[in-house]
Image: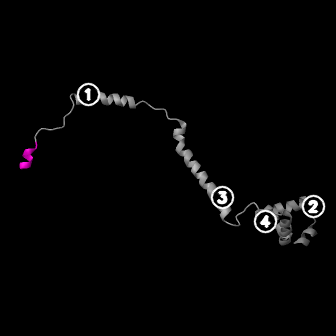
Amino acid sequence: MTEKSKIENNNPFKIPGNYFEDMTDAVLKKAAVTSQVKKVGFLTVARPYLMLAAAMIGFALISYLAIEFLIPGSETDSFEINYAELTEYLSSEIDETVIVEEIFKADMPDESDIPVQDIIDYLIDTDIDYAEILENF
């Protein structure tokens, strides 16, 4: 306890006079000065978005160039279609009767949807010979 007795009891820190009375006025003055609305320009708002868009475009460009130059066989410009060879190949590989049958299947309604009386009326109206019908079926 002898050391505590050596320390003086008076406080070295003091508050300036009228500090609390003048503090509210000082705070209100500073708030009034800083509360003025600053005009924000378009570029200030759009700058982060423009930087993001530029970064994405740069990344896409670098990726494209890396693929074009580093990966062999990725050239898309050398691909040409020879329509004469394609037509010749398709005509030799595909039977024409199959194509015609598929077209008629797509255009013709299902037989079960057509009433028998409508078929008879159609045959009578178009003057188709009864013997000719029997030959085909």
Q: Of label 2 and label 3, which has the lower sequence position? A: 3
Amino acid type shown at disc 3: Leu
At x 93%, y 65%, the residue is: 129
Locate residue 14, reporting x and y percent: 19, 34
Q: Residue beneath label 3, please?
A: 65
Q: Of label 3 and label 1, which has the lower sequence position? A: 1
At x 55%, y 47%, the residue is: 51
Q: Nearer the viewer, mark 1 or mark 4?
A: 1
Q: Gap in Å between the C-alphas at discs 1 and 2?
A: 115 Å
Dots 1 and 4: beta carbons under 8 Å? Answer: no
Amino acid type shown at disc 4: Glu
Q: Is the stretch drawn in magenta largely helix, strand or loop? A: helix
User: What segment carries the magenta color?
Assistant: 1-7
Question: Which of the 4 image quarters holds residue 21?
Answer: top left
Q: Of label 1 and label 2, which has the lower sequence position? A: 1
Q: Nearer the viewer, mark 4 or mark 2?
A: 4
Amino acid type shown at disc 1: Asp
Badge 2 marks a residue whose secondary structure is loop
Q: Residue beneath label 2, please?
A: 127
Q: Is residue 51 above or below residue 23?
A: below
Q: Gap in Å between the C-alphas at discs 1 and 4?
A: 101 Å
Amino acid type shown at disc 2: Asp
Q: Residues within 10 Å of mark 2 (few under 14, many from 20)?
A: few
Q: Is residue 112 above or below residue 51?
A: below
Q: Which of the labelled discs sits on residue 22, or is there none?
A: 1
